[in-house]
């Protein structure tokens, strides 16, 4: 008898998780929050630079660094590669970890120059370009996928800490790795770059507004479609 109850409880839980589909969540968030207008940057080079500079810092700091580059007329691949490393470090200093980031930026720019710029990358198979990105110093999967999606318009789903947190708090753990999470979204959604673009931006917005360390579940639109979180012991409804 106890076995039957356990089985029923488990299958109800499975059923609930099955109802938590990415498509339902996207449709609801898009309806409630509307288009997010990402990525905040003009042209693929600025977007790629932003994706590298945003590692471990907030977007305000990245904007200040990009503004410095813009003010010097340096949002240009060739010109940017010609300035001394120290100058680059000074200009991107507001983004933090400026020495490491200047080195990473230069590695990426040199690599990009060797490829002949962004255009030839558009024509290469997605998995090939992604693997090549991941070989560049300091380009991890989140940065690579941000550049692929937002600078090149290729259909890859970007996973960040907010996305993992939202899924986990709703009892969804597709696996341990970045790739497990990426596949979870990509296998259940049409490979549409515009959809991926909006969806990632919407999840970031949810993370910033509601799914903080102390989540604001009462007001969060995710709860309206996926139900209350299951992965939280004591959800706190006040911001910190
Ligand atoms: S309902 Fe709560 S746990 Fe779920 S995404 Fe919103 S804030 Fe996070």
Image (cartoon, helix red, strand yellow):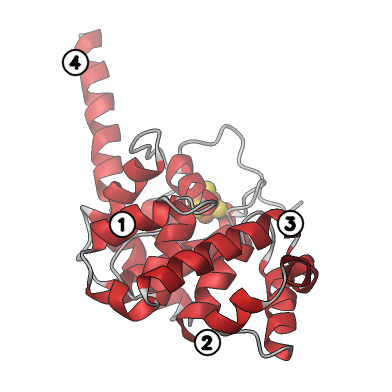
Disc 2 crowd, CA 10 A, few/some/many (<14, 14-19, 20+): few
* Residue 157 location (% of width, % of height): 35, 60
The alpha-carbon separation of the residues under discs 1 and 4 comes to 30 Å
Which residue is label 1 attached to? Answer: 22
Q: Which residue is mark 4?
A: 4
Q: Which residue is mark 2?
A: 42
Q: Earlier in the sequence, mark 3 or mark 2?
A: 2
Mark 2 or mark 4: whose residue is earlier in sequence: 4
Which residue in the protein does label 3 denote?
A: 99
In the image, 177 versus 50, the foreground residue is 50
Going by the image, does 158 lie left or right of 67? left
Few, some or many residues within 10 Å of mark 1 (<14, 14–19, 20+): some
Counting from the top left corner in percent of width and height, residue 224 is at 42, 59
Determine if residue 215 is in view: yes
What residue appears at the point 22 percent right and 75 percent down from the top-left corner?
123
- Mark 1 or mark 2: whose residue is earlier in sequence: 1
Closest to the camera, between mark 2 and mark 4, is 2
Q: Left of 93 or right of it: where is 193?
A: left
Report, in whole angstroms, how far the alpha carbon at label 4 lies from the one at label 3.
61 Å
């Amino acid at each position: 008898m106890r076995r039957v109850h356990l089985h029923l409880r488990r299958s109800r839980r499975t059923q609930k998780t099955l109802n938590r589909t990415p498509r339902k969540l996207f449709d609801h968030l898009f309806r409630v929050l509307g288009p997010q207008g990402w990525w905040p940057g003009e042209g693929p080079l600025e977007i790629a630079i932003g994706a590298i500079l945003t590692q471990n810092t907030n977007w305000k700091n990245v904007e200040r660094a990009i503004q410095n580059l813009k003010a010097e007329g340096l949002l240009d691949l060739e010109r940017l590669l010609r300035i001394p490393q120290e100058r680059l470090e000074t200009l991107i200093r507001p983004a933090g970890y400026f020495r490491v980031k200047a080195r990473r930026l230069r590695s990426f720019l040199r690599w990009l120059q060797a490829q002949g710029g962004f255009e030839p990358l558009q024509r290469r198979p997605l998995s090939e370009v992604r693997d090549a990105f991941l070989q560049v110093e300091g380009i991890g999967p989140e940065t690579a996928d941000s550049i692929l999606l937002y600078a090149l318009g290729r259909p890859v789903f970007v996973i960040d800490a907010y996305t993992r947190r939202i899924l986990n708090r709703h009892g969804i753990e597709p696996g341990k790795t970045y790739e497990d999470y990426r596949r979870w979204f990509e296998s259940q959604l049409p490979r549409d770059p515009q959809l991926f673009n909006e969806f990632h931006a919407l999840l970031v917005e949810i993370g910033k507004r509601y799914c903080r360390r102390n989540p604001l579940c009462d007001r969060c639109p995710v709860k309206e479609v996926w139900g209350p979180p299951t992965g939280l012991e004591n959800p706190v409804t006040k911001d910190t």
